[in-house]
Amino acid sequence: MNVITDAICPFCGSLCDDLTIKVENNKITDIQRACVLGHNKIAGVTDHARIEAPLVRKDGELVETTYEDAIERAAEILVNSKRALSYGWSSTSCEAVSKAIELAEETGSVIDSCANVCHGPTTLAVHEKGSPAASLGQVKNRADLVIFWGCNPVHAHPRHMSRYSMYAKGFFTKKGRKGRHIAVVDVRETDTAKIADTYVQVDPGCDFMLLQAIRSAINDNEDVIPEIVGGVPKETILELATMMKEARFSCVFYGMGTTQTRSKYKNGDAVSSLLYDLNQYSKSVMIPMRGHYNVTGFGQVCNWETGYPNAVDFTRKFAYYNPGETGASDTLLRGDVDAALVAAADPGSHFAQEAVKCLAKIPLIQIDPYHNPTTELADIVIPAAVVGVEAEGTAYRMDSIPLRMKKFIDTDFKSDEQIVTDILEKVRELKRGA
Amino acid sequence: MSELIIKNAAVCDPLNGINCEKMDIAVKDGKIVESVSSNADTIDAKGKLTMAGAIDGHTHCAGKINVGRLMSPHDMRMNPVNGLSGLQPATSVTRAQAGYNTPNTFALGYRYSKLGYTTLSEAAISMMAAKHTHEEFESIPILDKWGLTLFGNNWQVMNYVRDEEPEKLAAYLAWGLRATRGFGIKVVNPGGGEAWGWGKNVTSIDDEVPDFDVTPREILVELAKANEDLNLPHSIHVHCNNLGKPGNYETTLDTMKIMEGIKAARDRQVLHLAHLQFHAYAGNSWREFESASTQLADYINTKDHLTFDMGQVIFGPAMTMTADGPLEYSNARMLHSKWSNKDVELEDGAGVVPIVYSPKSFVNSVQWAIGLELALLVDDPWKVMFTTDSPNGGSFVNYPEAYSLLMSAKKREQIIETLPELAIDRMVLPGIDRELSFYELAVMTRALQSKMFSVDTIGHLGIGANADIAIYDIIPDKIDAGIEHEKVKQALSATSYTIKSGNLVVQDGEIVSSPRGKTYWVNASGRVPSEINEVTLKDIQNNFRKYYTVAMSNYVVDDHYLPNPIEINTQEA
Amino acid sequence: MKLETKLITGRTAYQGSYLENKTNPKYFEECACCEMNPEDLNKLGVSVGENLNVKTAFGEVVVKARENDGNPEGIIFIPMGPWSNAIVNPDTGGCGTPGFKGIPAEVEKTDKEPLDMISFMRTYYYQ
């Protein structure tokens, strides 16, 4: 039996690295310390129905083929397209991302990550205003005030609270949960709100107003704050501001409740602007609650390799970036791409209907371990190893700390990195031939 | 077996005492050799200026530069230096390029190569994010790299300093260098980074660091001693307290003075002061702001224990990035600029803030002058490393602009004329007529680095050195750099040939091949007695168990991240 | 009876548990559902497990009713997935990301059954 300690969980952006995995005869027999999300993902590698072989759509049905054939067909689609979309790359390794970027450059494609339907607006907010952040251990060791704004870690990042934020005990926080005030701002009383000390219910779409009101209070401009802002009484706003000013170290964790709602990137900007002022009085940082375990890594690699964090268009052989134009959703909505390569993501599930309709119309290549709604639309399906379980590689935690994911078991499936490398080689071969 | 002979080179090689002498250079298998066979490829240098590949001893090229990129998508299109900035399409040899102050990794590699650079020293590796630095290193083509690891606000360092445990301190440093695959010890605003954990700072080398019962002075001295005990190739590399504040030169002088008694383990300085320009300010307020370069140069001219780099300012947009978290917050507030911050648990911090140095600003103008003053007032070029603290003072693509300023009093005069009168009153540059020679420039950009980092295979063209060679389109004895400064600038902006490890990478200012570089790291564990190592490891493990949010085994940078390593073992030295 | 509400979509641990297992009927069960305040369910005369038709300016979808007293009245929640995304706002407002939250939605009882994953994809996206 092989026991793997300090194993890294390939599910969410918390990237917990304290799992113990037991393996017997190349089968995972025990998973310790993972949450339900991580456990199901790791166990699912053998429990869930995998895409067993490469598939190609013939007469409307997906039929089995070889890796070689699937890769050649994929390369042909990319070479023949005027402008393909390469999308996803968030539940995979940085090494695969790097190759995917090279492929996008070689084929003159648009490449984008899941941030497009997630924390993309957060990226725009950083462009606008920067981001005063910290590693998660600063929160663990110092924070006496934690605010979860538009995020619900009980469901989305279950171990975040015990490892980093709510319950964690550290050097200056020996009392853990008891010494820490937890506030939740949300439109619903989520399961996270239910275990907080303070729950502030804001009306949908009013986060920006509420953030600005708190900022006004921080700056001693109480007089400009109306009696109710976005459903929140002025009294509560002043209490929040006082709480933030009097904390020794506070952190705002913010999620989809800020990025996917009205004001989108302006909400992240407002958090950053609030902290820009608050830090005159008390230390405060912000950390986005990233979803896919390596969506942060995609942003990092794409940023250093192309200059931009996502939504990069290589149609003109140099990097062009304008997320409202070159983002995956917008290119699809406008019908501006004539083929798509989707890997380590499921736009069939997670894109808005109008974007999915475009995906259904164009040649679609999918690289994924599992059958999912995107498979229903795909013309070529290339099964992949599960990174972080069957393949190793680098991933970045939500606070941009890199970790090397381990391989627990062997597989015959190719890794994402290998598949992209093969497609790239085939593309170059075809281009040379042409 | 590749052979190359460079004929008719006007070689300027200070480490070997060669001052623009016409000679041939033979290259075999990436090294400089006595002679090669008649089958060797030939480059006719036609009497052009030939130097060893340049070494940027203090640049921000990997790691938090990515925060800068994220904050400045507009930077990618910025193209103020033709051929060395902005968006450039992919070619059959090169990947797509972008950026000016924060170029993408490929542009960094290509553009440094075009300037004749072949080695980079990244100024700060954040320990916990060290894998990130190495990932970016791997992505930067052509050049060799190393990075200096941040230790100046590290809890375990401060605990050992307070508890007077020098042996454990050295053991921890050796462990940390190995864990991060770092080259040397970087100290940034010692103690100030920890105070910033609570939104505070320290203001002198004798302030107490909150909760740790140590002072910056103690941290600096003990780290310097441990550095020498470990026989590290480089000295401690210090970013002093109080960067960027009027009157800070006194703190800088204090920092230099406390190092006078440290004994060097090698033939080099015991203290390197980073970007001295930012630490050379007199006056008690911004209103009174003035140059303190004379005060610092007077001291440095009488001492031999230190080196410094300029931190020259280039007029125009720049991107400040430093582990000095509190400084960046005050920068952002002062400039009303956007602000990113990144504290790292138990270790250090970082901040990134964009800036524009304007020749219309009296403060910026004085800053511009101070960098030049320091380089020109310090008599011995072997104490002065050329930098802009890229991209803090300005992007590296402007180095030729700064070279020509150092080489031409006339050029300086032309610029000074355009600056605010108040600025001219507060600087000493107008009275300086010294003009650097190519020889002195070669010292400041190559030879000194070889010595100060104790890497004897680079920075010169002697037998056995790496064949890292830059050939510029200048006939040294047919040009008066003082007058023809524009011509000098142009020639130094794009080499006729850059050769990296014997491979031709640049020809006539264009990239012709793009091999991968190597990464240096320093293994000092041989200097640590095993019993000391054991007890120190227990302390390290304890910190991981209780305070870090990653496991120790996942923290350490493994071999995967250094596919082409050069390990320097300090035991063997 | 139709109820005017605002739709929020997002992650649940149950939906997330089947993220890499979407052909499993449990994924369908955990996604093709709508959490509402008990008062709102009363207003509609709908019991937990009965079917709701949720309609927005961008489409309509049939999902099962669930109760969640954490939802204020007038706010409904459908876990992220193909069903919710059939009716979210695709417009990115020029910043790349569609509107997944705070979409005006009309809810009423229906006799139609939700479509399982494969039927759903075929009905909505095969031409």
Image (cartoon, grey):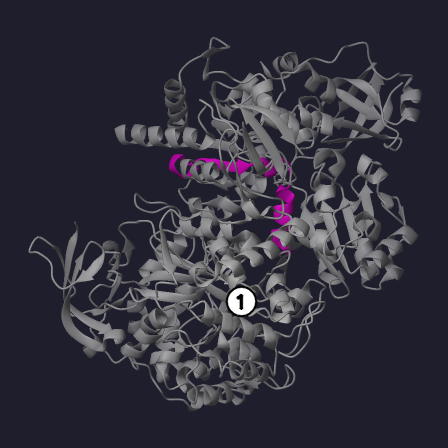
Residue B503 screen position, x and y as percent: 24, 53
Classify B61 as above or below B563: below
Residue placed most toward the observer, C111 or A41: A41
x 30%, y 65%: residue: B458
Q: Is residue A71 left or right of residue C101?
A: left
Residue A362 screen position, x and y as percent: 50, 22
Residue placed most toward the observer, A379 or B185: B185
Q: Is residue B243 left or right of residue B271?
A: right
Residue placed most toward the observer, B392 or B259: B259
The three-letter code of the residue at mark 1 reads Glu
Residue A273 screen position, x and y as percent: 71, 57
- SS at circle 1: helix
x 39%, y 79%: residue: B383
User: Crowding near pointer 1: few (<14 within 10 Å), some, many (20+)?
Assistant: some
Classify A266 as above or below A155: below
List the single residue furthest toward the left: B38
Residue denoted by label 1: B167
Residue A211 screen position, x and y as percent: 78, 51
Question: Residue B361 appears in which quarter of the rendering?
Answer: bottom right
x 40%, y 82%: residue: B412
| Magenta extent | A104-131
